[in-house]
Image (cartoon, rainbow, N blue to C red):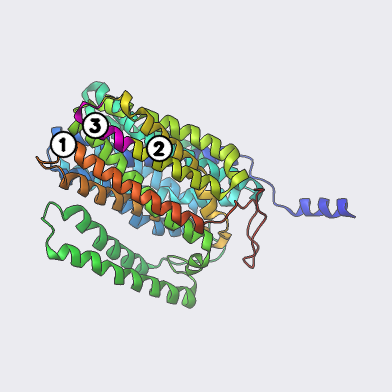
Amino acid sequence: MTDTTTTTAALDEPPLYRWRWFALAVILAAEVMDLLDSTIIGIAAPSIQEDLGGTYTSIQWLAAGYTLTYAIGLITGGRLGDIYGRRRIFLIGVVGFTVVSALCGLAPGVGSLIGLRLLQGVFAALMIPQGFGIVRTIFPPRELPSAFGLFGPVIGLSAVLGPIVAGALVSADVLGTGWRMVFLINVPLGLLALAGALRFLPESRSSHPLRLDVVGMVLVVVATLMLVYPLVQGRELDWPAWCFALMAGSLPVFAVFAWYEVRKQRRDRSALVVPSLFLNKAYVSGLLVMLIFFGAMAGLMLVFGLYLQLGLLYTPVRAGLTMAPFAVGLALGSALSGAVLARRFGRRTLHAGVVTLLVGTLVLYATLGRHDLDLTSLQVVPGLAVSGFGIGLLISPLFSFALGEVGHDEVGSASGVLNANQQLGSTVGVAVLGTIFFTLLTPAGGFTHAMRAVLLVVAGLVVVVFALGFLLPRRLRTTEPEADGAPGELADA
């Protein structure tokens, strides 16, 4: 009787998409393009500034401008995929991203480059959120942890390898392109991603008809701009009162956005952000952890790259290679966490990663204090390698924890909000930590003083992440949540 029932259930299951792992590879390739572009500025910016001019604030905008429009557009990008088809929107994003990358490589001035970076973020916002939605529709529940588990190490490694690749490309000066090659390299990568998407990505969309939430989109754009613009521009303007008024005013606008989304969902179930997501404890906890974690890491990577070049006068390639231990540690931590530790120890793996990251940050802080501007690349290896290993332990299972209990009807909104949250955290991190660094660059303080102050702030944020980690589920889910919201099967702990 049991065999007959099992056989019948198996026959009722939809056939698996045979190219699902190839499709995942295409999606991850798009993630790599995006993350390389969001992390190159820390290395490429001094060369850009030398060639095109601009201020320290221009450097911040080159980094924050991309992540700002990316964060703002991600939620709408996820919704467009729900409405018009995720494959179709993904293809539009890839084509636009590739074309604008080529234009970035040809930019005649710093102002035009900042504008193109803003546009580049828009197309990334169309491209990236479709990936999570497609993965959720083509992989069976038992394979989802493995599929989502690849996002963490790929994202982490891309974020860390970005400075290394940027340094190599700038220093190689291919055909006299200098810093421009960090953008032009996206052209062949984009063409490969486009070909792979046309061949392997299936079409998918939401199971119920949806409409664009224009009012919600406008509210979230206004609120985000009110928060981020004064954070980046305030230092150069000597912090006029309107900067603080704008930042404070963003909070009630976000509150109005939340209120409107609840009403919109009750009225026609087409809210830009599905309010029920914020009743999902695992998802909300993941958002909080990612917001602070990615903010700390994005700000740190930008500032450390600038410190190596502007303070220690390293060449771009040396600055990039100096960060290599960070990448190696992250790769090892991700592999160990994804393959063994996260499934066996669950949330304890995340906490182990946070503690390891804190130790590495404090080691780096002490190393800089000991050697100051006589610092060599070898002397930062312990601090960077330990920090990278800790990030690897943390980041590999984080997406699985956050998305493991999200239902199919919420996946478009969930993936958009998750990515937007990550990018908003990165934008704020670049703005805040960059502002701290440049503000402390005084004759009395100097580069090492400013860099160590940033490291202390990062250490404090890491402690906050440790505390928030207790809000995450103790173990990873290995099956879909039930329709009524009951939990699925838990991985062994």
* Circle 3 SS class: helix
Disc 2: CA contacts within 10 A as few (<14), some (14-19) or many (>=20): many
Q: Mark 1 points at which residue?
A: 49
Indicate which disc, 2 or 1, sits on the residue closer to the N terminus. Answer: 1
**Residue 151: x, y in percent?**
49, 43
Residue 144 lies in the magenta-colored region: no
Q: Do the residues labelled 3 and 2 touch (CB within 8 Å)?
A: no
Which mark identifies residue 308? 3
**Gap in angstroms between the C-alphas marked 2 and 1:** 29 Å
**Gap in angstroms between the C-alphas marked 3 and 1:** 15 Å
Which span is picked out in magenta? 364-375
Residue 373 lies in the magenta-colored region: yes
Q: Quadrant of residue 107?
A: top left
Q: Residue at horizontal 32%, vertical 68%? A: 219
**Residue 369: x, y in percent?**
25, 35
Magenta stretch prevailing secondary structure? helix
